[in-house]
Image: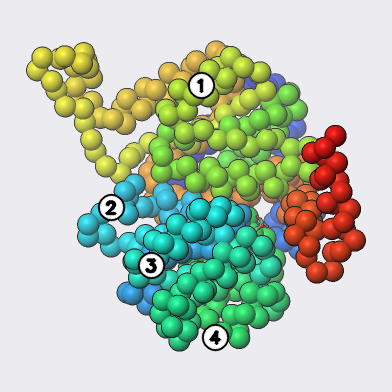
Amino acid sequence: METINVNVDFTLPFINKNELENKYELSYKHLLALKHKTGKGNDFLGWVDLPDTIDHDEIKKIEHVAADIRKKIEILVIVGIGGSYLGARAVIDMLYHNFNHLLPNRSRPIILYAGQNMGEDYLFQLLEILNEYEYAIAVISKSGTTTEPAIAFRLLKHHIENKYGKEEARKRIIAITDASKGILLNLAIKEGYERFVIPDDVGGRYSVLTPVGLFPIAVAGGNIHELIKGAQHMKHQIFKIHANENPAIQYASIRNLLYEKGKKIEIMVSYTPRMHFFMEWWKQLYGESEGKEGKGIFPASVDFTTDLHSLGQYIQEGERILFETVLNVTHPTNHLAIPHEPDNSDQLNYISYKRISYVNDMARLGTLLAHLDGGVPNIIIDIPTINENYIGQLIYFFEIACGISGYLLNVNPFDQPGVEAYKKNMFALMGKPGMEEESQRIKERIEKLFND
Ligand code: PA5
């Protein structure tokens, strides 16, 4: 089986060999800390073994429930935010036809998302659309108390019960949450929804290979066995390969060294629009894992060649605080060549019969050269093609490298204390029961903020 390849050659002019060797050694120790669960946040390391320990009965149940629900729906609405939706969205977008929603005889349901924003128009228009289609809901929340999905679910629950009646609605709602606590769990038990459990020791952003990702991906027609197999393959590679050639150690070490040299922003680059949400997933994984205690690389992303016409100028000549990690899919799924034009009126005949991917490749190589000349180090991740197996490899690779990266910064990569700050203020402003005193204080501060 082929493996995704991490090429760090284009960062080497920016770092020194000795410091790299030292960093590899350190990263290797952190890899072992993940393996033996001896580092910070070690009660949230269930995901490390997940590819090998996934319960086969659980997989069967996921596939069975997914197959059943697929028979009666045109749309699946996934309700969740952050780690409770980005992984599924990343994988589904990569596997889907770019225009699935317009395919006349599509075999895969349309997947829509709710609870990942509080846009009133977004939710209103979603409900409008759902009046017209057969649908079901997968509501996903580990804590079972996150406000955005909870509000979206309340709206959708009303809608689906009005549309189908309580009994049929019950059969169209699947809840994915904690095994023993949370409001969503209580609601799911009370209403009798089909349920899947998110393991205690797996945090949201590391949960794609639990029912959080696997159930929606299965409904979307993805091969979850291959996804897990890919992750398994990567796990075995990472835990057996020597530090200098170990992709996770290489990636974590190099990005940490570049950070120490003032490269504070990592831009993830994709040349295929199918990977847009994979980069969103990656941004959450790294941003929430590393950004704490005044430290951490800021994870950004761009879609090339599109963004070469908007952000390309900055990357080429702006502040020299950037490095890039390029996701290079070497074989597109489809084949499309540029036709020949006898009168060459658009002057493109010099590339007649060339594939679109050839042009994309030349853009990629030209950009690599230009950005290196501009002082932007590049890490290249070669992905043979987009399928479940390689996606599984990528997911596991980035997760492990993220754990190592957090340890290199000496932070706990598995908590997210900073996310609470806005929530506390928001609840206080909305007058949540029990927050009366806080509410007054926060309102005064907001007033002062706008009036000073
Ligand atoms: O990675 C995380 O822990 C977070 O992004 C959560 O996934 C996100 O906040 C949603 O939380 P929950 O699943 O509890 O609704």
Gap in angstroms between the C-alphas marked 4 and 3: 24 Å
Q: Is residue 383 above or below residue 151?
A: above
Looking at the image, tell me whether mark 1 or mark 4 is earlier in sequence order: 4
Vertically, is 341 above or below 46?
Answer: above
Residue 192: image tag: 4
**Disc on the earlier residue, 1 or 2:** 2
Three-letter code for the amino acid on which mark 1 is drawn: Gly
Residue that carries the numbered disc 1 in the rendered image: 312
Residue 257's mark?
none
Residue density around tag 2, few if under 14, some if 14–19, many if 20 or more, within 10 Å: few
In contact (CB < 8 Å): disc 4 and disc 3: no
Which residue type does callout 2 highlight?
A: Leu
Near mark 3 (Cα within 10 A), the count class, few <14, some 14-19 or many ≥20, is few
In space, the residues marked 3 and 1 are separated at their CA atoms by: 42 Å
Is 369 positioned to the left or the right of 38 in the image?
A: left
Residue ID at (32%, 61%): 108
Which circle, 4 or 3, is nearer the viewer? 3
At label 4, the amino acid type is Gly
Give ligand 1's quarter of the image. Answer: bottom right
Kindly indicate whether the residue at mark 4 contacts the one at mark 1 (C-beta within 8 angstroms).
no
Mark 1 lies within 8 Å of ligand 1 (Cβ measured): no
Using the numbered discs, state the Cα–Cα distance from disc 4 to disc 2 in whole angstroms. Answer: 34 Å
Q: How many marks?
A: 4
Residue where numbered disc 2 is placed: 102
| 384, 81: nearer the viewer | 81
- Secondary structure at numbered mark 3: loop
* Residue 335 position within the rendered picture, expressed as x and y whole percent measured from the top left: 24, 38
Q: Where is residue 394 in the image (x, y as percent from the top left)?
A: 51, 47
Q: Residue 131 carries which label?
A: 3
Which is more toward the observer, 396 or 191? 191
Residues at circles 1 and 2 in contact by the CB criterion of under 8 Å? no
